[in-house]
Amino acid sequence: MRKIRNIVIITLTIMVFSVQQGLSQATAPQDPGGSPESGPPLGGGAPVGNGVYVLLLLGAAYGTVKHLKHADEPCPEED
């Protein structure tokens, strides 16, 4: 009985995920109209500034971790 229950649960789970995958497809984008020469700039004027700040923060965090990791190691003595 337990084996049959497990098979039914697995089958229902696969069916639910299959239906969910089919329903989660994005709809086609609308036609922007107009020609590229007279329309808005390519890329839609995406805000690049926020991405630059995130990149700088990640770089600073990476540098800080590397510095703290190597700060505990003794320096090799010069002859």
Image (cartoon, rainbow, N blue to C red):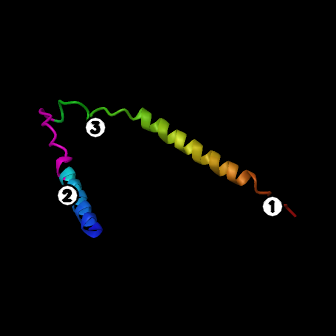
Q: Residue at x 26, y 64 (%)?
A: 5
Query: Label 2 near label 1: C-beta < 8 Å?
Result: no
Q: Mark 2 points at which residue?
A: 15
What is the magenta range? 22-35
Q: How many marks?
A: 3
Spot occupied by residue 76 in the image (x, y as percentages of width and height): 81, 61
Spot occupied by residue 66 in the image (x, y as percentages of width and height): 64, 51
The CA distance from mark 1 to mark 3 is 51 Å
What amino acid is at disc 2?
Met
Could you tell me which secondary element the residue under label 2 belongs to? Answer: helix
Query: Label 3 near label 1: C-beta < 8 Å?
Result: no
Spot occupied by residue 52 in the image (x, y as percentages of width and height): 46, 37
Spot occupied by residue 67 in the image (x, y as percentages of width and height): 68, 49
Q: Residue at x 26, y 37 (%)?
A: 42
Q: In this view, does 64 lie above or below 47?
A: below
Q: Name the residue under label 3.
A: 43
Q: Mark 1 points at which residue?
A: 76
Q: Would you say residue 23 sits in the magenta stretch?
A: yes
The circle on residue 34 is none
What amino acid is at disc 1?
Pro
